[in-house]
Image (cartoon, rainbow, N blue to C red):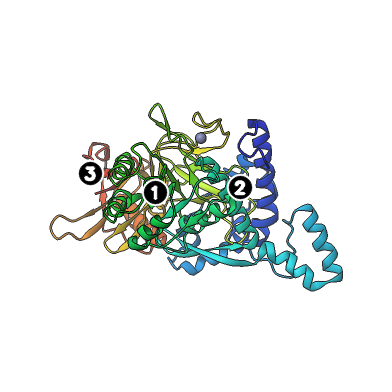
């Protein structure tokens, strides 16, 4: 689609609805073991998922839903399994006809056609509470590259640009997708590795106009490069890989000026949530009247919706919200209604971007990446299944969960304050049921369940920082 970013709203909706139907009915429902079972268990007919509105009614899933025991092996159930017996219904018209012909006459040719779309050959590693591989087929990598070319357009890069990255090489979307993006856009790109001596040497060889730096350490890295007399004079774009806060952006720009670069570089962020294979980007210009553009998504390659982070229920009201991603046209690890674990300040923004005019949905600022998976001491703690288990209980009227360190000895604690339902629930029974549900959800009992009857809960002083109204982390 040449006009991927300029479709009229009605046309965009039509394109998305069609892609959702194809992805759900022809790819995910028949060939993803996880979703095949889930559709059956929920008694949902995949044929009824006929567009984005119906998609939003499918329960969203996260890491713990796919791997209830915390074993990343479970993620394999998300990978599209298409063998000889399962014909790839999702193929496009011409490919489908070619495959159908080959199926009758040339079995090897048939397999080759099918496997380009269905055989996973490339992997990136990701995850918040667990670390797992995300599988891509050859055709998936083509989509990542195609989105990458658009990413470069969004960033305002052109053929005069030269990109140098200070990233540590990794099988991660932030690294792989950026490489594919530069390749697809025809932009010379250098990834000398995380050793800054090597980066400085590279910057002596090539006049970088784009410097890609991990968002969290950008200013320090640029400072160090400056100390090594690296040539940063031509850098007009600082690409922060990850989600920077305002301070980090300003510090990166200031560091560049101090290091001999221009005083007013454009500072943009590219970001991929856990599980995703596409990098989202802010558009150039970075800000209009102090407003950030948000991360632009690819509406023909994904649908980004939101759920309430405490319940997992679909909603675009209130804040913060958790973005949920459905990939379109992807095979390999095909994510459907995937909970990112991030928190955004509000719903995905629709309509033309006031900065660049592209009609693509945008994930708004500020964004807290991975905020819903925290740590309890040494182990990761996914707060979503805990909150989901509590809010699913009809005998709990209200609740709050707090992750903190006990002041006495610094031991990590998961505390649950709860108010039993008004319908005569026995608080002790409620506590037992709650504890058991939480253990079933995360394999761990809460440190303490605290009964807070008669509106006491509402009067508790706030502690630490509130991720959401009911989830607090000290
Ligand atoms: Zn824009």
Q: As displayed, is residue 362 above or below residue 330?
A: above
How far is mark 3 from mark 2, CA to CA? 41 Å
The secondary element bearing badge 1 is classed as loop
181 or 83, which is in the foreground? 181
How far is mark 1 from mark 2, CA to CA? 21 Å
**Disc 3 vs disc 2: Cβ atoms closer than 8 Å?**
no
Residue 301, which numbered label?
A: 2
Residue 176, which numbered label?
A: none
418 or 278, which is in the foreground? 278
Residue 463, which numbered label?
A: 3
Q: Is residue 212 visible?
A: yes
> Residue 442, image x and y in percent?
39, 61
In the displayed image of the protein, which residue is found farthest to the front? 205
Residue drawn at x 56%, y 55% is: 183
Say whether disc 3 or disc 2 marks the residue closer to the N-terminus.
2
Say whether disc 1 or disc 2 marks the residue closer to the N-terminus.
2
Counting every numbered tag in the picture gives 3
> Residue 187, image x and y in percent?
54, 51
Residue 369, which numbered label?
A: 1
> Residue 335, image x and y in percent?
56, 55
Q: As displayed, is residue 386 above or below residue 282?
A: below
The local crowd at label 2, few if under 14, some if 14 to 19, many if 20 or more residues have their Cα within 10 Å, is many
> Residue 270, image x and y in percent?
45, 47
Q: Is residue 419 visible?
A: no
């Amino acid at each position: 689609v040449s006009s991927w970013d300029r479709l009229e709203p009605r046309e965009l909706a039509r394109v998305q609805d069609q892609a959702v139907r194809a992805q759900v009915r022809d790819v995910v429902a028949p060939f993803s073991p996880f979703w095949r079972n889930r559709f059956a268990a929920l008694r949902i007919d995949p044929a009824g998922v006929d567009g984005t509105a119906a998609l939003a009614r499918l329960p969203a899933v996260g890491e713990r839903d796919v791997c209830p025991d915390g074993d990343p092996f479970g993620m394999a159930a998300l990978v599209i399994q298409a063998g000889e017996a399962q014909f790839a219904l999702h193929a496009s018209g011409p490919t489908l006809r070619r495959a159908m012909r080959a199926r009758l006459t040339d079995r090897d040719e048939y397999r080759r056609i099918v496997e380009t779309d269905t055989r996973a050959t490339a992997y990136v590693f990701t995850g918040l509470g667990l670390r797992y591989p995300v599988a891509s087929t050859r055709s998936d990598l083509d989509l990542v590259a195609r989105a990458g070319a658009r990413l470069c357009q969004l960033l305002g890069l052109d053929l005069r640009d030269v990109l140098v990255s200070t990233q540590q090489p990794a099988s991660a979307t932030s690294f792989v997708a950026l490489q594919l993006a530069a390749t697809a856009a025809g932009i010379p790109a250098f990834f000398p590795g995380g050793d800054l001596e090597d980066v400085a040497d590279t910057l002596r060889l090539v006049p970088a106009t784009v410097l890609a730096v991990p968002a969290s350490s950008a200013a320090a890295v640029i400072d160090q490069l400056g100390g090594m007399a690296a040539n940063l004079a031509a850098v007009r774009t600082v690409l922060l890989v990850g989600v920077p806060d305002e301070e980090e952006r300003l510090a990166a720009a200031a560091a560049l000026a101090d290091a001999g670069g221009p005083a007013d570089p454009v500072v943009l962020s590219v970001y991929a949530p856990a599980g995703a294979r596409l990098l989202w980007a802010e558009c150039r210009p970075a800000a209009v009247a102090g407003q950030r553009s948000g991360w632009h998504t690819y509406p023909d390659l994904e649908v980004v919706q939101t759920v309430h982070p405490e319940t997992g229920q679909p909603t675009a009201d209130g804040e913060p919200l958790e973005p949920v991603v459905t990939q379109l046209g992807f095979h390999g690890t095909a994510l459907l209604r995937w909970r990112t674990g991030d928190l955004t300040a509000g719903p995905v923004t629709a309509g033309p971007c006031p900065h660049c005019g592209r009609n693509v949905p945008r994930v708004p600022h500020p964004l807290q990446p991975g905020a819903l998976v925290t740590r309890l001491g040494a182990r990761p703690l996914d707060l979503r299944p805990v909150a989901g288990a509590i809010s699913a209980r009809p005998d709990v009227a209200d609740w709050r969960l707090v992750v903190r360190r006990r002041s006495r000895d610094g031991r990590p604690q998961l505390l649950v304050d709860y108010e039993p339902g008004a319908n005569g629930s026995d608080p002790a029974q409620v506590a037992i049921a709650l504890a058991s549900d939480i253990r079933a959800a995360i394999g761990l009992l809460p440190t303490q369940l605290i009964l807070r009857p008669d509106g006491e809960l509402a009067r508790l002083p706030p502690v630490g920082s509130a991720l959401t109204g009911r989830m607090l982390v000290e």
